[in-house]
Image (tube, grey):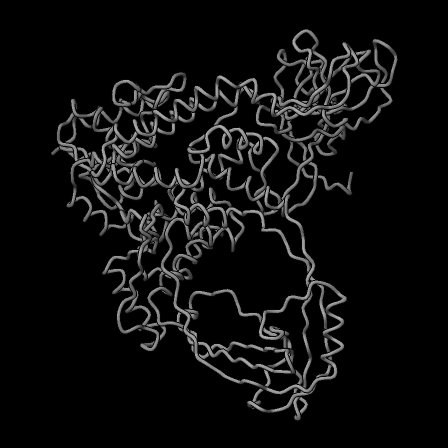
Amino acid sequence: MAKSLVIVESDAKSKTINRFLGKDYIVKASVGHIKNLPKNRLGVDVENGFEPEYITIRGKGKVLRELKRLATTSERVLLATDPDREGEAIAYHLADEMYSNNNDIQRVLFYEITEKAIQEAIHQSRSIDYRKVDAQKARRVMDRLVGYQVSPILWKTIYMGLSAGRVQSVALRLVCEREAEISQFVSQEYWSIEALFNTREDNVFRSKLVKIGGENVNIPNEEEVQKHVHVLKELEYIVSESKTKEIVRNPFPPYNTSTLQQDCSRRFGMTTKRIMAIAQQLYEGVDLPEGRVGLITYMRTDSTRLANTAVQDVRQYIADHYGLEYVPQKPRLYRNKKTAQDAHEAIRPTSILRPPQKVASYLKPEQKKIYTIIWNRFVACQMVSARLLQSTLDITAGIYLFRTTATVVRFKGFMQVYAVDDEKHDDLPFPENLKKGNRVFLQKLDPQQHFTKPPPRYTESSLVKEMDSQGIGRPSTYALIISTLLGRKYIEKEARSLKATELGMAVNKILVQQFPDIFNVGFTARMEEELDQIESGEKNRPQVLEDFYRPFNLAVKRTMEKKEEIKESLQEDQNEQCPKCGRELVVKWGRNGRFIACTGYPECKYTQPLEPQETIETDEVCPQCGSKLAIRTGRYGRFLACSNYPKCKYTKAYSTGVPCPQEGCTGQIVERKSRRGKTFFGCSNYPACRFATWYRPVSVVCQKCGHSYLEEKSSKTKGDYMQCPQCKSIVRQSES
């Protein structure tokens, strides 16, 4: 009997699914997309309905041939790529290639990798959703049109190799605008006053001045605050109001992609890219005693909807483990945002009977963190609200009003499972038994100086939150957007904050000034809505792309015509003359950042670094002029150069002083930089000798095997140490 061929995207998922389906199925992976637009040309027929020209991705031919061979001998083909637009597009391309091999091709959607869910999905197979494919095709074409037509503008105005993306550039704009806000911010001084009171029973408590003459406190300087302090010391203080009320804190909705990224980034300091990679592992399957099983539902979703069966199961679990008082009368329902596609459930555990403590020993530390927070949030979202008591005490003295507040948890409710940020507690207890009209006694006044602070830089968590609230991109793209901006060096990280680089600011300046109607939040959010309308059938793809492309193409042409003007606007006068030809020097952009160059280029090619490099002279002598050699840093790392530069231009590679270990080679091991900017060490006789290592060689002979050098290494557990590359023996730095 012929078997059914099931095609998924990843090898890890195929192994998990194969265990559940058994011998009547063959499960294979396409390993992501099999087709894409060509790299060396636009690949979009602008004059013919914006039809994309898809070609087989280089290296995927072997995978595709194997899948087509298996399709020929299979009873049917089930395309089980991810249940989103990208997955639908991959399924469409696979089907298009395989119809000549097998015409019984169906689409199946696995929202969770469990035996029950997979069996149900197989029985609910359907045809490919061409509207969803059309929406993804429109996004891909739109991104290609922007990337291929705007990027050359950056090449001609800044330098070759830069790129612009339709959505990434709007995210960059957010970061740059925040950076501009910070740089333009002017701090303002203000003062607050806290008072220490005691009661007749000598109970001491703290209170803060909140109003003066019925208006919010606004004390601009020390002179003003001292006037108030002088008056306050002479007044009598009376309790004008004392009240306690119960407040209710409701649980948070279950996670979607955006809120999972925000929470994990904030709590654990993980990058959004790392969070999604770990969530993918939990979705595709983890090895447990009963076999490999997916622990969470599909992790790319903008919905907070939950399956009825999952809600029933968790309500029963809450009753059994926490008590009936923790179960609300009715299941909680959470409303999605208007822009949510609601194609999938929220992110939740595939089984409530796998609490974190039960599977912890089978998970890596990061997997455990993320699974635990997903499990806790899911359980908490179906628990009763927490009840808190909030007490407020107002104290009046003339025109002044002081206030003390305190919050006490009366019933934890969902907070029993899902921890929230703790309330700030005063080190002094809240005064009890004080009633309206009671007198309290001033013990001390504490005026405090403050300064207003600029808005904080975005973190990955807060940038995701902003993109989500503004409708920029889709939750499934947030991690890619941020990692792309970091990879292009348009933004950089300082601790957890995201900061626009000089390059990012320059790119943003061009894009915003030349394409104000395209690289903005409103337009990008509107395009996301139109992609949704293509998927729902309300709009057709060619018309949406036509409406986008015509004004965009005109803007590109106008910008290209004034590229020299744009390039000059990025230059800065240096107010110095060229030492070679006497013309003016300016600051320009190049592949390695900004530098000083002569305006007489190309006749005069004089350049110099924008900031003088720190040079360290050595005892080595230049063989050409006899001056000392100095250590400098260039594009490919450190090197030795004559200190008499530019008169003498002698250079040579920076040597570690360790001879090359390759037999018969007379070279030295020198410091180099890879194309990605990472330091490595290779032979000075390259390319004749290709010896290379990532670890810095040290001229210390191994005491165990006599090897000519050791390598410097470091790890969290061992700290800094040296290791022999031949016998692997370890030498502590202190032992050498």
Residue 423 lies, in percent from the top left, at 54, 70
Residue 291 shows in this picture: no
- Judge by depth and name the residue closer to the eye, 415 or 48: 48
The residue under the point 48% across, 77% down is 409
In the image as oriented, which residue stretches furthest toward the top?
603
The residue under the point 20% across, 34% down is 130
In the rendered picture of this protein, how many numbered marks are placed on residues? 0
Relative to 460, 550 lies left or right: left
What is the quadrant of residue 728 in the picture?
A: top right
Relative to 623, 493 lies left or right: left
- Judge by depth and name the residue closer to the eye, 252 or 653: 252
Relative to 105, 509 lies left or right: right
* Quadrant position of the C terminus in the picture: top right
Residue 150 lies, in percent from the top left, at 45, 24
- Judge by depth and name the residue closer to the eye, 176 or 18: 176
Residue 69 lies, in percent from the top left, at 22, 24
Task: Classify 433 as above or below 25.
Answer: below
The residue under the point 42% across, 52% down is 260
Residue 333 lies, in percent from the top left, at 29, 62
Task: Classify 188 as above or below 698.
Answer: below
In the image as oriented, which residue stretches furthest toward the left?
1
* Quadrant position of the N terminus in the picture: top left
Relative to 694, 417 lies left or right: left
- Judge by depth and name the residue closer to the eye, 93 or 518: 518
The residue under the point 64% across, 54% down is 453
Residue 99 shows in this picture: yes
